[in-house]
Amino acid sequence: MRAYRKNTLELPDKDDQADALALACYGFDHLNSDRKFVQIREPIVVKIRELVLRLAHLNRCQSPIVNRLRQDLAWQFPEMAKVRFTQNSLALRWLGGSTESKKYEKLLLNSVGLGISSTVVYHAERLIHLHQEEIEIEDKLTFLMTDSRFDVYRQVFDRFGFGDRIQGMILSQIYPLENYLTDEGKPLTIYRRGRNSGNITKRYLSRRRFEKALGIAPTGDSSGDKESKKIIGGSDLCRIALWQWIFVRIEVKRNRPKNEIGQSLGEICDREKATGKPIRLVRMRIAAKAVRLLFKELVKAKNS
């Protein structure tokens, strides 16, 4: 049996001087760059971000409790199984035993269910406590956003019909807007030759970074002959909040902001849905259009 000697590759000794030179050249190229360090948020923005994340956590905690409560009510008190358990709702407070209601007591007497058990009362109490904590956090969030540094941002947000929660989410991601602009306060754009067409195209770098921060910008993914685009990076909370905002404020005609922003996004929504395209694709396109419009309006407001 023939024996083969395994080829080995001997690596050169580590050269610290070469590494130091490479780091020095890299640092020199980025010496005057505003993005050479990790972003450091201001303390008030850090606090807003913390409150927003707490609200998202409480929202996730409520979903399984509400689902379990409805399942129990389906056979214990089916007439109440589809009632909305919102903050300070009479139905929830009555189930938790913190208030009385002749309406629900009469329904319970004539119910076809088997009667309310202690588990339903416990679930209702848990939801009430979660709602109380939610209200306290929302009050703190609203107070923090009254800071004068956010006035320009909130004026633009109000035109889009954003609520306090989504305003806090977006602020925690994009404040200050100057991080996305040049020293002159203008959006950064470059001209580059297209890879496939060979034509000179305009690249909106500032807007692209803004979209990326809010979790809207798609990223290309190529493998062999297959090319695709998918959302990678950015804030998942902002992306979900924007989808919910579209579902509530844009798709419902009576809820659209009564201005050119609501009219423009509403027309796009109606036109896209009329073509029969998948609703996920329609909402994604509206979200992309809304974020681009938001960046344009914020830049205009900051420079006015």
Image: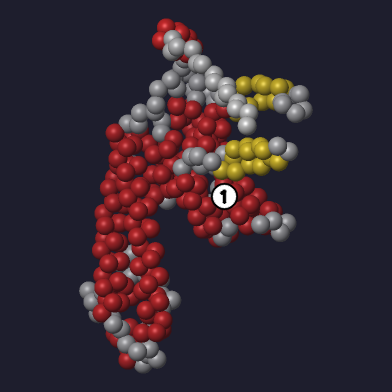
Q: Which one is nearer the viewer's eye here, 147 or 48?
A: 48
Residue furthest out toward the front: 1
Residue 76, quarter of picture: bottom left
Q: Quadrant of the N terminus?
A: top right
Residue 225 appears at what percent x and percent y? 73, 38
Residue 29 visible in rendering: yes
Count the numbered circles shown: 1
- Residue 159 against residue 83 in the figure, above or below: above
Q: Amino acid at mark 1?
A: Gly
Mark 1: secondary structure: helix
Q: Which one is nearer the viewer's eye here, 108 or 16?
A: 16
Residue 253 appears at what percent x and percent y? 58, 59
Residue 208 appears at what percent x and percent y? 56, 33
Q: Please report the residue visible at 58 percent of the width from the left and 57 percent of the height from the top.
A: 251
Looking at the picture, the colour scheme in use is: secondary structure
Residue 301 appears at what percent x and percent y? 48, 32
Task: Give neighbour class at mark 1: few <14, some 14-19, many 20+ (Cα, 10 Å).
Answer: many
Residue 150, quarter of picture: top left
Q: Which residue is mark 1?
A: 262
